[in-house]
Image (cartoon, helix red, strand yellow):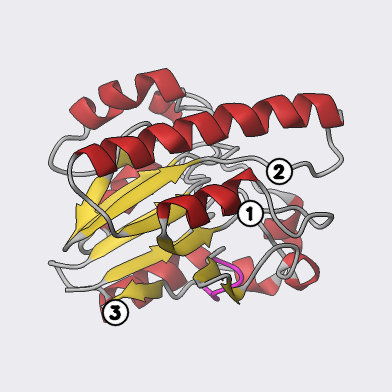
Amino acid sequence: MALYAIGDLHLAGQTKVKAPMQRSSKVWKNHEKKLKDNCRRLIHPDDTLVLVGDHSWGRKLEECELDFQYIESLPGRKILLRGNHDMFWEAKKTAKLNAMFAGKLEFLQGNFYTYKDYALIGTKGYCYEGLDTPEHAASLVRREAGRLQISFELARQAGFRKFIMFLHYPPTNIYERSSIFTKMAEMYGAEQVVYAHCHGKARFHDSIRGRKNGILYSLVSGDCLNWEPQKILP
């Protein structure tokens, strides 16, 4: 029994969309096959795989059908976190998704899941990347921090005191040493913070990696891991 994570599958079974990185970088060539082969080699039926956002290019659920079939075919229990490109998933419809995919997939947003004696906490997150105004970015950060706090509080009320925290966006941007997300991780005593979103070697060190203030930070973007899920806990 083990806990794994990887993010940014960017599947396009029906839409056939490809981002510039997927068209130009060798690491993205046949990435769906690479990931499936690695999952089948590493992950057992009683393992848990957290997929850390940006699952499909489909903008509506009906455009994601083949992508969800692919995810369901991966071994182990699958928990999905919301990413910035997951247009099929509105935060207020998380319960509907969990009902639709009951017994197949689990969606982490405004709730929590468990692994052994850990609570798995998560939200999409946000950080300023220069694509919007600082004021708008700050409002999105506050919104996501509020959603993350709900996840922590629900788990704590259920009696959990050991936490693994998942974000899609990195916990800090390139201008920050800390953020509301790192402070929340420290306040609740999260042992690890796992995130994705950063693509290409030039971006792999945009945020915290390694241990800081007693917390282990890991980037699990698929291209960073060369499509081999990272073991988070044994």
* Residue occupying the point 23% across, 73% down: 2
Which amino acid, mark 2? Cys
Could you say where residue 132 lies in the image, as x and y percent from the top left?
83, 30
Q: Quadrant of the C terminus?
A: bottom left
Q: Is residue 108 visible?
A: no
The tag earlier along the polypeptide, 1 or 2, is: 2
Of all residues, the one furthest to the top in this rendering is 92
* Residue occupying the point 62% across, 44% down: 180
Residue at the spot of label 1: 170
Q: Judge the density around disc 3: few (<14), some (14-19), many (≥20) Cα neighbours within 10 Å.
A: some
Could you tell whether 22 is left or right of 211 in the image? right
Q: Residue 217 lies in what quarter of the image?
A: bottom right
Q: Residue 144 lies in what quarter of the image?
A: top right
The tag earlier along the polypeptide, 3 or 1, is: 3
Which amino acid, mark 1? Pro
Residue at the spot of label 3: 42
Residue range (magenta): 222-226
